[in-house]
Amino acid sequence: MAKMTCIEDLRRVARRKVPRAFFGYAEAGSYSEQTLRANVADLEGVLLRQRVLVDISRRSTSSTMLGERVALPIALGPIGIGGLQRGNGEILACRAAQAAGVPYTLRTLAICSIEDVAAAVEQPFWFQLYVMKDRGFARSLIERAIAARCSALVLTVDLQVLGQRHADIKNGLSVPPAIKIANLINMATKPAWAYSVLTGKRRTFGNLAGHVRGKARVKALTEWIAHQFDETLSWKDVEWIRSIWPGKLLIKGILDVEDARLAAKSGAAAIVVSNHGGRQLDGTASSISTLPRIADAVGSDIEVLFDGGIRSGQDVMRALALGARGCILGRAYVYGLGAGGQAGVERAIEIIRKELDVTMGLTGVNGIAEIGRHNLVER
């Protein structure tokens, strides 16, 4: 891992080590992937303002997110089938995050369950919630998160319908899943991956275990999930969740100023400016292009976090300068997980930290709270 100098290095190794279907699932966007590309390109288009002859000897990347101290202003976001990027992937990623002093978010449709992760780590983590048609199941997930002492609930609100990802269909990760000989052959060429997954706790969606009776197989569970995304989801459901969940609530998937204002009035502790990593509405705005307007509109009323296209510490700096309190990593740490398990995730976080530290120094910044639009080149 010491030879991995950037997130792209981790990506190349992960692509070699992880079977095509699962690597493609993590990497792909929806439809033509216009939004996926824009997330990365628009971040790169934000130019940093170099400053010189500034005393930067007191530099620190530490900050706060949701009122808690973090070693750097990032959190590991909710990602799908982490346990199929590497066996026990969610546990390994959570351990890496906690060792680095940043939050980790477990997804509803993770391979390892809430209880699996809680039993394997020492500190609380965040839990991401999909509200499905089966409200009893949604309530039970919230109650399990409470029992596991999760420190925040991340409500994803941009998945009422599922954006089509062409790569998943071609790789057999459709509904129902298709068994492809080419995929089986490809998996057979990844013995280290196969061993890690076969010796892991689970190989299917852990949080659904025992809930969907008679549907223990991945195919049946996937079909059930596909019919559970709820097109009636509304702000009334946010009220319902707040009546059950006693802790901090984040609303993830905000891309519009009016939605941000409604979220600020909902009692949530934070919003996440996000277009689901370019995996849902294709052809919409990049996350970074909407961040400044949203931060200006509600940043004094609610904590604003950012998600979408982060691949470097420079990207973190850009998002902070445009109004974010912190950033959510997705693919950047998934590549580390696929490349090297816990050590790979730790390396991904360390790469981001070092890049952010150097960027702060070369822009004349000592602390996260000092970062603002004055650190950017005017366009």
Image (spheres, helix red, strand yellow):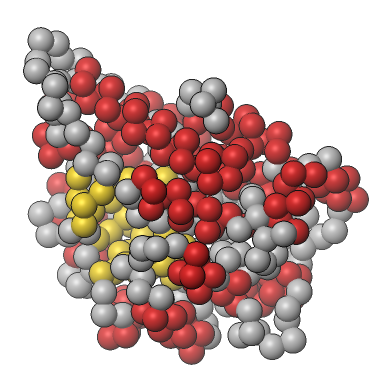
Write down the quadrant of residue 349 in the picture: top left
Quarter of the image with the N terminus in it: top right
Quarter of the image with the C terminus in it: top left
**Is residue 47 in view?**
yes
Q: Exactly how many numbered labels are in the figure?
A: 0
At 67% across and 67% down in the image, what residue appears? 202
Q: Is residue 54 above or below residue 12?
A: above
At 76% across and 70% down in the image, what residue appears? 219
At 39% across and 81% down in the image, what residue appears? 147
Q: Position of residue 368 (x, y in %)?
A: 17, 37
Q: Is residue 293 left or right of residue 284?
A: left
Q: Position of residue 218 (x, y in %)?
A: 73, 70
Write down the quadrant of residue 142 in the picture: bottom left
Q: Is residue 322 left or right of residue 196?
A: left
The residue lying toward the viewer, choosing from 11 and 300, is 11
Q: Is residue 59 left or right of residue 201?
A: left
Q: Is residue 57 left or right of residue 164?
A: left
Q: Position of residue 125 (x, y in %)?
A: 38, 63
**Is residue 182 in view?**
no
At 26% across and 74% down in the image, what residue appears? 247
Q: Position of residue 300 (x, y in %)?
A: 10, 54
The residue lying toward the viewer, choosing from 121 and 334, is 121
